[in-house]
Image: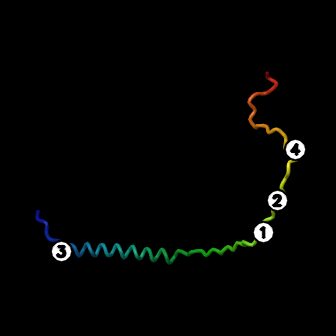
Amino acid sequence: MKIDNPFASGQIKNYILFYAAIVVIMILFFIASSLFNDIKQEKTKVFDTNVTLKKAPVLVEENTTKEKKSPIVLMKKDVY
């Protein structure tokens, strides 16, 4: 079996035409998909940065000397 030169036998022309046809089909699909795809325009949002914040009143505890209790109870005093 003898391998012929693809340039002399004309096979290379068929491969190049096949490759060009695939590229043209891909370009046509890209153009068709971009033409029929409508892009929605969103309204731009404007943020007002000149708003003054109202400070919440500070709550002062009257009895600050209270003993702080832990939320975890290890043992009840009634038991022992």
Q: CA distance from mark 1 to mark 2?
A: 13 Å
For the point 49% across and 75% down, the residue is 34
Identify the mark nearer the N-term, 3 or 4: 3
Crowd band around label 2 with a 10 angstrom C-alpha radius: few (<14), some (14–19), many (20+)? few
Identify the mark nearer the N-term, 4 or 1: 1
Q: CA distance from mark 3 to mark 2?
A: 85 Å
Camera-near label (3 vs 4) is 4
**Residue 63, numbered label:** 4
Above/below status of 80 relative to 55: above
Above/below status of 63 relative to 39: above
Camera-near label (4 vs 2) is 4
For label 4, the SS is loop
Residue type at tag 4? Asn
Residue wearing tag 3: 7
Residue 4 location, quadrant: bottom left
Residue wearing tag 1: 52
Residue 12 location, quadrant: bottom left
